[in-house]
Image (cartoon, rainbow, N blue to C red):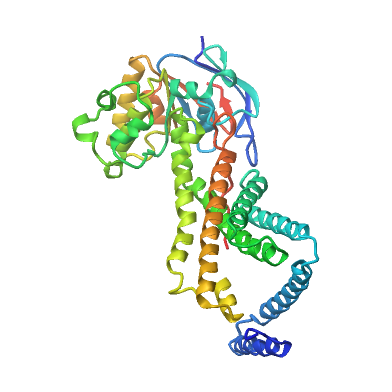
Amino acid sequence: MSGDVGWWGLAASLIMVAAVAVLSWRARLRLERDLAIAVVRSLTQLLLVGAALKIIVDQDTWIGFSFLWVAAMVTFAAITVSRRAPQLPGVLPVAFTALVCSSVAGLGLLFALGVFPVEGRTVVPLAGMVVGNSLAAGVLAVRRLVEAVSERRADLEARLALGLPWPDASRPLVRSVLRLAIAPDIERIKALGIVVLPGAMTGLILAGVDPLDAVRVQLALMYVILGAAATTTSVVALLGTRRLFTADHRLRPIARDATLED
Amino acid sequence: MALFALDAVTVAGAHRPRLDAVTLELPPEGVTVLQGASGSGKSTLLRLLNRLEAPDAGSVGYRGEDLAARDVLAHRREVGMVFQAPVLFPGTVADNLAVARPADEPAGLLARAGLDPAAFLGRDADTLSGGEAQRVCLARALATRPRVLLMDEPTSALDPEATLVIERLAGELADDGISIVLVTHDADQARRVGDRIITLREGRVVAP
């Protein structure tokens, strides 16, 4: 196959990394250590994943293992999202619910509509894309929620003070979180093909698939991924907002965080 | 009967209690002023009265009823609040009044806050001066026909002229039978508007 990268090919690609390391050393950027860690980590992680995928993809392996893998991905993604906004009360169950909803909806659609068959070969890679993008959307949504609630504290309390129940008082907040968190996905889709040649399509073409077939696969994936990301954002915004208020319609104190900026 | 009766109310804080076992009665008529330096607990006390905060210990009574047992949304409509910095919602003055689901005509509400309805109803909230904005907030708070109005340093962001307008309006509303509880750090203002003055220091009531 034309996309075959042998061990020597992989080693050769490290020449580029070595060049960056030399540059970093000459210019005293002190990035060599981080760079070395990044290379070693990516190598071991991906090789381990590759080895595991080899087992999963095997026709004789029970398909349940694939779904166990997906469950682990969703859990790990939920933990990652919750760590980015620890000051949100109950953020872990919120993130977990959001990722379960988006994965079930995204993968369910891909499989139910027969876009892909349910096989060891498809489940984990597709889930990786759906969960990975939902993870990014979830991080954006929780961060935006924390920012919005500190920006809008006075507005929220003024509405509560007028006797509005929390769902009414928080409606403008939810709308702003949703708009700001979903907008980047829409922008990315608009730039598709012009700026971004997406990964799945590139990979298929490299592996020798007809470009138009590759485009069809990619488009189906992108739309499902957009839907999954939007699902994550919506669930985070709606359930997360609920957790900002007490049962008697008070706004909980949420710490502003200077320490957690990226 | 007392308007509000606090019984050994404590609100916890980061370093020390924001309110420390406060026992206090507020009278139902006139303007009652809660006075104190920043950090004295006066705003916390005010926020307890419409349940934007809840006590960690002790209890708050409202006209002989346990405040915690009342319907919180109905209570907030009966006990309105005006905040330190005027908080206007996006849109026009009329939009702002509409958020409160007014029980009265918007024009009448603005007139009570000393604003000409013809000139102000259609104005964008962004274009108002600080004093005008605070009067719109007052009109909005009156929209729910409150029996009590809580005012949290309502003039600290305003110029002297706008301050006097708000003080005069507070007095007029009290004469109309709305109980006013006003928080201020300004002892002169307390003397100007207060029928009764309660001083707080470091989370406790200072004996008069």
Q: Number of callouts in the render?
A: 0
Vertical arrangement, residue B131 with respect to residue B6, above or below = below
Question: Between residues B173 and A252, which one lies in front from this camera angle?
Answer: A252
Q: Position of residue A152 (x, y in %)?
A: 46, 44
Q: Residue furthest top?
A: B1
Quadrant in the picture for residue A24: bottom right
| Quadrant showing the N terminus of chain A | bottom right
Looking at the image, residue B51 sits to the left or right of residue A75; the answer is left
Vertical arrangement, residue A9 with respect to residue A38, above or below = below
Vertical arrangement, residue B61 with respect to residue B141, above or below = above
| Quadrant showing the C terminus of chain A | bottom right
Q: Position of residue A251 (x, y in %)?
A: 54, 37
Quadrant in the picture for residue B118: top left
Can residue B66 be seen here? The reply is yes
Vertical arrangement, residue A144 with respect to residue B174, above or below = below
Can residue B192 be seen here? The reply is no
Question: Between residues A211 and A101, which one lies in front from this camera angle?
Answer: A211
Q: Where is residue A36 in the image (x, y as percent from the top left)?
A: 70, 81
Q: Where is residue B200 in the image (x, y as percent from the top left)?
A: 54, 29
Looking at the image, residue B107 sits to the left or right of residue A37; the answer is left
Looking at the image, residue A3 sits to the left or right of residue B114; the answer is right
